[in-house]
Amino acid sequence: MKTALELRQERANIWEQAKALIEKAEEENRDLTAEEQEQYDRMMQDMESLRKRYERLEEQERLEAEMRQSINEPHKPNPQNPNEPEKRDSNPLAAKEYREAFWQQFRYGKNILGAEEMRSLNVGSDSAGGYMVPDEFERQLIQGLEEENIMRGYATVIQTSSGDRSIPVVTSHGQAYWAGEEKDYKESDDKFGQKTLGAHKITVLMKVSEELLNDAFFNLENYVRREFARRVGVKEEEAFISGDGVGKPRGIILDADVGKITAANNAITADELIDLFYSLKRPYRIRATWMFNDSTAKVIRKLKDNDGQYIWQPGLQAGQPDRLMGRPIAISSAMPEINAGAKVIAFGDLSFYWVADRQGRVFQRLGELYATSGQVGFRAYQRVDGALILAEAVKVMQMHV
């Protein structure tokens, strides 16, 4: 099996072939033929496939290293009493008893639980009839969401227990002044505003056949984690990028400042990307990331600078993304397509987008609702909000109307 580095090199080789195809057409002062366009599109698909493969391998290597570290980590005695082990987490949702009772009722229903198991389970009961997931499983769900939702990897994620969370934001900075000897100091204070993050409810309903639930080899925990992360992650990413704030978070492109409006409503030039790059203030620019969708990436890949060099730079080293003008690139299908008036590129420090996770994701077994079809339903929900807390930290390119 090829290593991640070998897959990256193979991807870079394909890109060189694609560039040669475009350069040949440009030298002959013509567009790509139908056959060449088909070949180019196939190369782009191969590059995307290779990217996903080496990113999976790199993530797998990272997780394996993490697990080896966890397994090899030495036991740490209680510093107050070296003869006693460390105290267990006081969180009842982290207790072994709660975890076992939760998965027993989740697979087979509450009727099989004994009185002691029900007492353990009731500490996580929800008013709607569900139960908060065990502590360790919640961490796995969050990790799954990070894998499915690209914004979680860049945003600042905070945990909230209840109520709204107000975040102070500097709207204008104070400044220094030159002053003569024994002259008074000029007052110049930062001005503060605030952003409020609440909690929007996102739900998912899964159905599993009774035969699978009764199969001891069916890993229900993995199935639920994977499906919850996949379905919720997609919706989160859409909202965090382009959400309108009505019943869902406000997306990053909704509140970001417009840094450049294109001259055409269906094309982007290299000079316009440079204008967008420098529309962002330097403190944000040195930590900035580009974000756009696949179709926009296809357009940008063909752009060259004034020296005839492609401005797109494929990442060759393990763990390194592709780059544009020296800054990393993130691809998301939630970014708008190239159309008149659309905000198709975001460029900025995405850590200024804040995500507020309400602690306690809730799952409920629906044993009777789908009984006639031989299935068991599982309802799950979480509460989350998100917003760009400082508009000037991210700039967007908007297509001409």
Image (cartoon, helix red, strand yellow):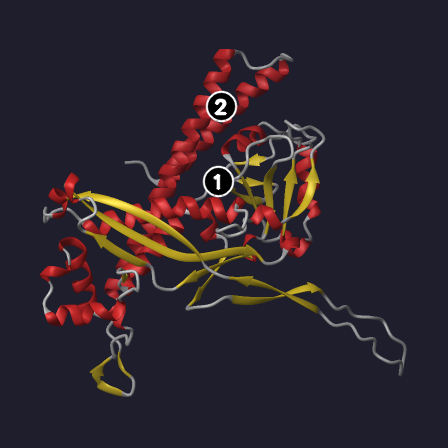
| Disc ID at residue 17 | 2
Which of 198/286 is in front? 198
Which image quadrant for residue 173?
A: bottom right
**At 35% from the left edge and 37% from the top edge, which residue is drawn?**
53
Q: Is residue 321 above or below residue 26?
A: below
At a point 59% along the width and 44% down the height, the residue shown is 346
Is 45 placed above or below 181 here? Answer: above
- Residue 137: percent from the left, percent from the top? 28, 59
Q: Quadrant location of the C terminus?
A: top right
Q: Secondary structure at mark 1?
A: loop
Q: Position of residue 37 (x, y in %)?
A: 50, 17
Tell me the SS state at disc 2: helix
- Residue 302 in which image quadrant: top right
User: How far across and how far down the image is residue 264, in percent?
Assistant: 69, 28
Residue, far bottom: 81
Q: Which residue is mark 1?
A: 332
Which of the labelled discs sits on residue 26, or is there none?
A: none
Amino acid, disc 2? Gln
Query: Three-letter amino acid code at disc 1?
Result: Ser
In this rendering, does residue 320 appear at all? no
